[in-house]
Image: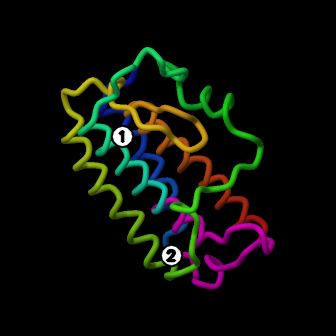
Amino acid sequence: MKPLAELVADVEAARAWVLAAVDGLPASLAAWKPAPNEWSVVEILEHLVLAEHSGVEKIYRAIEAPAAAIETNPNRGLPIETIIERTWKPREHAPPIATPQGGGTSTYWVACFRACSHVLAALTVELRGKPLESIMFPHFLCGPLDARQRLEFLRFHMDRHLAQIQSVLIQR
């Protein structure tokens, strides 16, 4: 299992790839939607920010109230890719807390996404020395995820939406 520093480094590497893909995009390209029911790059960025804030806040909550029954976690010890393969349908929908509301410019959402690094750094300080597997909070699709899996999820989620951003840009 990866140590905390490596998990966080993986998240930040994924963030850097997303930022490299979107930094400097003209506003018209960032706002373009491939179809009415698909997200623009701006909406993807908004979603990434909202989802990261929600996920990180849940880790903070779980630090303050550690899970009592770790053994009952059906996802115990599994990598996030396996959990997602077991629990997600082919095309899932974001929960309301992470659904883009269509406000803000691409420049704004890039700045917010970049600023998430500071929040993650503060969380890392809080997690140091704590058993990541005992810090659990349910994910709305995956079920119980421990802090390690939630950090893996942040990386996975950014990678997933980077592919979506690249697809949008290719279609344009």
Give the Cα distance between marks 1 and 2.
24 Å
Which residue does the image show at 31% across and 50% down from the upper left?
Answer: 120
Where is the N terminus found, in terms of image quarters? top left
Above or below — where is 171 with respect to 27?
A: above
Name the residue: 39% across, 71% down.
Answer: 111
Q: Which residue is mark 2?
A: 24
x 22%, y 27%: residue: 130
Q: Is residue 89 left or right of residue 140?
A: right
Query: How far from the left and from the top, in percent, is residue 93?
Result: 68, 55
Q: Position of residue 39 (x, y in %)?
A: 68, 68
Percent position (x, y) of residue 62? 32, 38
* Quarter-of-image position of residue 3: top left
Q: Is residue 75 left or right of residue 9?
A: right
* 141 on left or right of 64: right
Closest to the observer, 3 or 128: 128
The residue range painted magenta reads 25-49
Q: Is residue 41 magenta?
A: yes
Tell me the crowding category of disc 1: few under 14, some 14 to 19, or many 20 or more residues within 10 angstroms, Cα based.
Answer: few
Q: Secondary structure at mark 2?
A: loop
Which residue is pictured at 36% across the width and 24% down the height? 133
Badge nearest the viewer, 1 or 2: 1
| Amino acid carrying mark 2 in the image | Gly
Answer above or below: position of 35 versus 3: below
Element on which disc 1 rests: helix
Who is closer to the viewer here, 170 or 1? 1
Q: Which residue is mark 1?
A: 9
Query: Magenta includes 67?
Result: no
